[in-house]
Image (cartoon, rainbow, N blue to C red):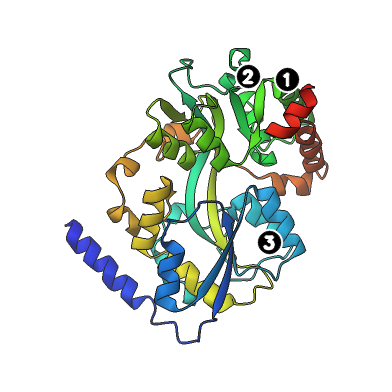
Amino acid sequence: MKKIIVFFIFLLTAASYGFCNESLSKELYVYNWKDYFAPDTIKNFEERFGVKVHLETFDSEEELIATLESYPEKYDVVIGSGNVTRGFIKKRLLLAINKKNIPNLSLMDPKFLGLDHDEKNEYSIPYLWGTTGIVVNRKFISEDNSWEILWNPKYQGKIAMLSGMDEVFGAVLKSLGFSCNTLNFAELKKAKGKMLAQKNLLAGYFETIALRDKMIKEELWAAHIYSGEGLFAMNENKNLEYFIPKEGAVIWVDSLMIPRDAPHPHTAEVFINYILEPQVSADIANYLWYANCNIAARALMQKEILESPALYPSEDILKQCEFLESSKIEDQFPGVRMFWKEAISVLQLNENNRNEGMK
C-alpha cells in the first residue's frame, strides 16, 4: 500500500510543474531561520531548476521583522510564524500569492489552512508546525513537567530562555495560568514581575540553535525551546526530554511568504511549490524533527517522528496550547508591545554582557 502511495505522490509531483511556463529568474533570495531546511533542500532546487539560491538566516523573529520593514525589496521568500504573518499583512509588507502556481497547496492538512492570521491564505503557505515548551536533562532534573523548572533556584546558571520577546512573555503568562494573549494589565504586570524574578537564575536568552547545542553538550540543564529543536537534541543526547508543560504552551505554524517588493515573485512561487513536494517536505521534517503540515509527506516520514507525542501531542494537551496573537492584541492595546519590549530589554542577556554585569 505504501508503494502505491509513494508512486501516486511521484506522479503528482511530476505533474505539478506543468504550470511553470513563465521563465524563471537566474537568482532567488531566501531569508529563513538558521538550519531550517534539510541539508540538500537548496542544492536540489538549484540543480533541478537552474536557479542560484542566496540563503540568508536570522536568529529571532524580531530580526526578521526589522529586516523586512527596512528592506521589503531584498528577499523573494521569507519564513515566519502566524503572529509575524499577521503583522506583515497589517503593514502591507507581503505580496498576494498566485495559488495557480502552488498546486501542491492541495496536499496541506486542512487544519493548518484558513487560520486566523491569514484566513484565505492569500499571503502565506503553511510550512511546519510545533509547540514551544521545555527540554530538560533528566540526569539533573526530575521534577514534574511544569514551567516552574525554569524558576527553580537549584538550577541557577543552568537554565535559559529563547531570545524571542513574544515567545518568552507567552511562556511566562502560561506559567501563571493566564492566556498568552491576555489584555488584562494586572496579569501583564504580574508576568513582568515574574520575568524579573527569573533574571539572576538564567544563563541567558539565546536563539534556538544555540539552546539546542548547549543542551546537547550539557552546558544547560533546562531550556525554553521549540519542539523540533527539543526533539533534535533528544536524538543527540539520551538524557534529554522535551515536553509541553502541564500549564500549557504556545503552538505555532510557520509559513512561507513573499515580501511585497520581492524581485523575483514568480520564481518564489515555484520555490514554495517545490518545498511543498511530498519528498522535499518529508526530507525537511525528517532532518529537523518537526511536525509537518503536509499530509502527503507523512507517508515518507520516519515512524519515530509521526509517533512522537512530543511532536504530535494528543488533543487534550493541544487544548492547553494557544497561538500567539500579540500583533493582533497590539491593535486593541497599543501599549502592550512596548510593555513587553521594556520588560525583556532589562533582561536581554548573552554570555558576554552577563559576565560584564556580574563584575
Q: Nearer the viewer, mark 1 or mark 3?
A: 1
> Where residue 209 sits in the image (x, y, percent)?
54, 42
Residue 187 lies, in percent from the top left, at 74, 27
Disc 2 residue crowd, few under 14, some 14–19, many 20+, Cα 10 Å: some
Disc 2: which residue:
151
Q: Secondary structure at mark 1?
A: helix
Which badge, 2 or 1, comes first in the chain's sequence? 2
Q: Tell me: 204 left or right of 288.
A: right
Q: Residues within 10 Å of mark 3 (few under 14, many from 20)?
A: some
Q: Gap between marks 1 and 3, in whole Å?
A: 36 Å
Task: Specify few, some or many for label 1: CA neighbours under 10 Å numbering under 14, 14-19, or 20 or more.
Answer: few
Q: Quadrant of residue 120?
A: bottom right
Q: Nearer the viewer, mark 3 or mark 2?
A: 2
User: Do tag 2 and tag 1 residues touch (Cβ < 8 Å)?
Assistant: yes
Q: Quadrant of residue 55?
A: bottom right
Q: Is residue 90 visible?
A: no
Residue type at mark 1: give it: Ala
Mark with earlier residue (3, 2):
3
For the point 69% across and 73% down, the residue is 261
